[in-house]
Amino acid sequence: MEGMPPVRNRFNNMPKKKTLSCRTTKGLIIIMVELNPYNLEPRLEFLNDSNRSMRGFGGLSIGNRRNKLVWLGIAFAASAIYVLDVEIIGINSSVLYRRSLRAKIDIYPEVSKAAKDGLKAMRDAGDKLMVTSWNTAAINNNPFEYWITYKGNPAYDELMVDIEQFIEKPGKKDIPVSEVFTQKMFDQLDSTLQEIGWESVRSYWEEDFQDRNIVSEFLKDPVLGKKRLASMPDRVTNTIRVKGSDDPACRPTVINMFDGDLSTTKKWWKEWQEFMFSNKLKIGGKNGDTLKKFPYEMLQPIKKSKYPDVTTKEEKDSLPLQTLCIAIFDAILVHMMNTVSNPDIWQPLKEKLV
């Protein structure tokens, strides 16, 4: 896909055979289930050269390792073939064929020959085939979720590279959280949390979060991700549909359509507090009625039964703790963008992308 970063994952050890929906194939197998944008039918694709073992290839190993993701894909594909009228495209010996469960076989000899010649050339050259899957669905409004092709504006590529470097190799930029989300900010937040009737999260701040480094110990902390302490509140408050309005309400953050000024963390913090605690939004209720809620009231408790990494105390304090974590998360993103780029550059880019 044009504009995407190069895929670096490489899988070795091709399987000799695999049964798929009561059909055994040999050699190179690529399985992909996709949604056809024209007829909205799932499609299974595979390449099969039944006359050659192709041991020289590096491919997707689904034999000895029994890769869970591959098995899941196979199971889904087999189910789709059985239940739906699935289109199958493949190369078998000398022809490329297209077959539907309700259609005749069409032959494309020219395409088949080109494909076979290409596979043979790869094998003879000792090249390895890299296989990956890519989820191209976007369920949110994050303008920086995908690396796109932005012709005529080199500033975009420079920005994306600088963001990647900040995350992958932050070096001295991996500063403590308290230097980004300051003590003053925390004091204001904790006071507000208690005013609305929630527990103080000062112990979490003083004993943990304030001393974490912003990249290695917060953004890239796998346990924090498993607990959903930042991702869950982001999911709920990122973009809120407002009843009676064509425009959604967006939390002041880098990763949505918020169009306010994020040129400094000070300006961001003022906007963020007002959004979360000062203005009620009209939202649709389950029964079609209209409710008025502050965004903080839309947060849901995080249950230990569903997310076992969460401690009993964290479960009890999950609402104020989520609020603290999403505030830290948003502050880090604003800091990152203004560190790697100039607000006069990245903010106009963001506006065009969304």
Image (cartoon, grey):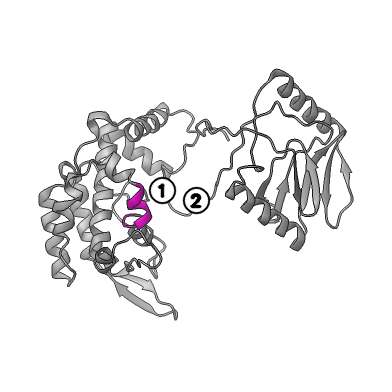
Task: Tell which of 120 and 95 is nearer to you.
Answer: 120
Given contact means CB atoms under 8 Å apart, are the residues at marks 1 and 2 in contact? yes
Q: Does 236 sit above or below residue 165?
A: below
Above or below: residue 173 compared with residue 85: above
Magenta-colored stretch includes residue 219 = no
Q: Check disc 2 and report the residue beneath it.
A: 138
**Where does the N terminus fall, quadrant-wise?**
top right
- The amino acid type found where label 1 is placed reads Asn
Residue drawn 77% across and 24% down? 120
Instruction: Tell whether position 223 is magenta.
Output: yes
Horizontal placement of 149 versus 42: left or right? left
| Residue 320 picture location, percent across and down | 23, 64
Q: Which mark is residue 142?
A: 1
Q: Which amino acid does label 2 sit on?
A: Ala
**Which residue sits furthest top?**
125
User: Where, by quadrant of the figure, is residue 155 drawn?
Assistant: top left
Element type where label 2 sits in the image: loop
Location of residue 347 (image quadrant): top left
Rendering coords of residue 173 (x, y %): 24, 32
Looking at the magenta stretch, what is its main secondary structure?
helix
Q: How far apart are marks 1 and 2 (CA)?
A: 8 Å
Left or right side of 171 for 283: right
Q: Which residue is drawn at 44% across and 81% down?
A: 287
Image: magenta residue range: 222-230
Instruction: Identify the residue at horizontal 21%, vertical 44% (top origin).
Output: 212
Residue 341 visible in the shown view = no
